[in-house]
Amino acid sequence: MHPFSQLEPTLSRNEPRIYLDHAATTPMRPEAVAAVMEGMARWANPSSPHAEGRAARAALEDARRRIAQALDWPHHVILTSGASESASLALRGRPGIGVAAVEHDAVLRAADRPVMLDVDAGGIVSPLRTPALASSPSRSFRAKSRNTSQAQVSRLRSRRTGSARP
């Protein structure tokens, strides 16, 4: 039995259903569900010095290592509670970041005075419709913040439109 089967809606008719709201959430792979359940069994605070805390810390660091390895990422992996917290962590206090017009509301709320980037009919950032992109010789957005860093927020794949950036 699936661990969350009790949360599945009951149907008034006995008809097969097709779930089409993947823009809101996507079912987890069975391997991911198993990993989450295993992690939830480690209820101790990973910052505590007792044996249970040290075991939880070891599991957390092992998860970071495995994620970094799977993504071929040589840097520290930061785990957050979700996309909204991640966007806030990455974007707060950085004014003038280019944000695709079809980005999630959490990104738009986290960005400080975002520069909206137009998209084409397929939901892809369009250099021809966005002056900041069209005027750049490399056709990449260049927005300078207080500390002269540059950033653009644009998903590789949109769950809303199904489009994929080239």
Image (spheres, grey):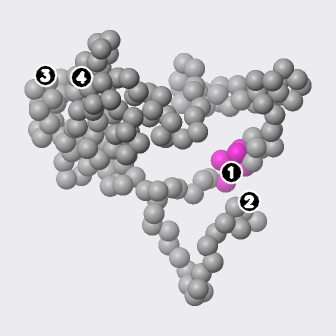
Answer above or below: position of 107 versus 37.
Answer: above
* C-alpha gap between disc 4 and disc 1: 40 Å
Q: Please give the label number shown on residue 143.
A: 4
Q: Please give the label number shown on residue 57.
A: none
The mark nearer the N terminus, 2 or 4, is 2
**Stretch of the chain drawn in magenta:** 30-36
Mark 2: amino acid? Pro
Local secondary structure at mark 1: helix
The mark nearer the N terminus, 4 or 1, is 1
Q: Please give the label number shown on residue 137.
A: 3
Farthest top residue in view:
147
Q: Quadrant of residue 42?
A: top right
The mark nearer the N terminus, 3 or 1, is 1
Mark 3: amino acid? Pro
The answer to whether residue 84 is magenta is: no
- For disc 1, the marked residue is 33
Of tags 2 and 4, the one toward the viewer is 4
